[in-house]
Amino acid sequence: MEPWFDTHVHLDAYPAEERGALLRRAADAGVGAVLSVGDAVGPAVDGVRVYRAAGLHPLRSDEYAGTGTLASLATGPSVVAIGETGFDRAGPPLKVQARVFEGHCAVAAKLGLALILHIDEEWERIRGFLEAVGSLRVVRHYFTGPEEQADWHAEHGHYLSLGKPLLRMPHLKEVAVSYPADRLLVETDSYPLAGRTTEPRDTGAIGEAVASAREWSMEHCREQLWTNSLRAFGL
């Protein structure tokens, strides 16, 4: 069977000495690739490919230095995506986040890279800004929204990435069933947080929930999600 692909991990949030153990546990759990969002790629670990996304989280939008700086970061080794970028209600003013978001879209378009979309904001307040993604390959990261939002992403051909909330939020099972099969991804959104134990090795549990919801065999599920992940990031 194909391995699992964790499409969103914050390796740079872990101390350098912990990253190797994190990835070795992932390899033991059948994870064959992770996408590290941030500056760190992690050490080389047999059986796990580590790719990178370059960008500035919306909470840090006021640190943005322009498309030139972002483009230079995005040409680094193993970078396959721009982001995560988007909108967060706890971030700087919306107009600041919108300017930074549009800059990320421009760099993704110029370099032909996928755009990783973060949304933790009122949908009606930001929906107009989302038109800036145009025809980019878009990954809506850690989706927990209502089915109406999922429908919008499906209509635009976006990839939808599901995390552990799929295991506890019933409406996400409906999303997992109805969303186009060739646009589904899974992720852990791993980062250290008091009381949180999620890490890349948990990717399989999320994939198994997708298989259960869609009544797929495990072999088919792993193959489908792996293929989707490679396509999403142009690999």
Image: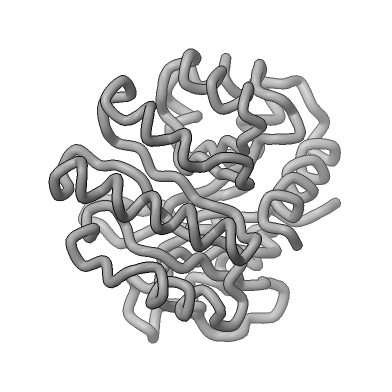
- Rendered residue at 50%/62% (across/down): 107
Report x, y in % for residue 69: 38, 77
Residue situated in front as seen by the camera: 11 or 195: 11
Residue 220, horizontal then vertical, whole percent: 84, 37
Q: Quadrant of residue 76?
A: bottom right
Residue 84 vs 74, above or below: the answer is above
From what the image shows, is residue 180 above or below residue 139?
A: above
User: Residue at 49% across / 29% down in the picture?
Assistant: 166
Question: In the image, is residue 177 above or below residue 66?
Answer: above
Q: How many marks?
A: 0
Q: Position of residue 141 (x, y in %)?
A: 48, 43
Residue at the (66%, 16%) spot, across then down:
178
Q: Is residue 124 left or right of residue 154?
A: left
Q: How is the image coloured?
A: one colour
Quadrant occupied by the C terminus: bottom right
Indicate left or right for 220 with 17 as reference: right
123 sits to left or right of 78:
left
Q: Is residue 224 above or below residue 36?
A: above
Q: Nearer the viewer, residue 124 or 30?
A: 124
Residue 117 percent coordinates (x, y):
45, 45
At x 58% / y 72%, what residue is drawn? 79
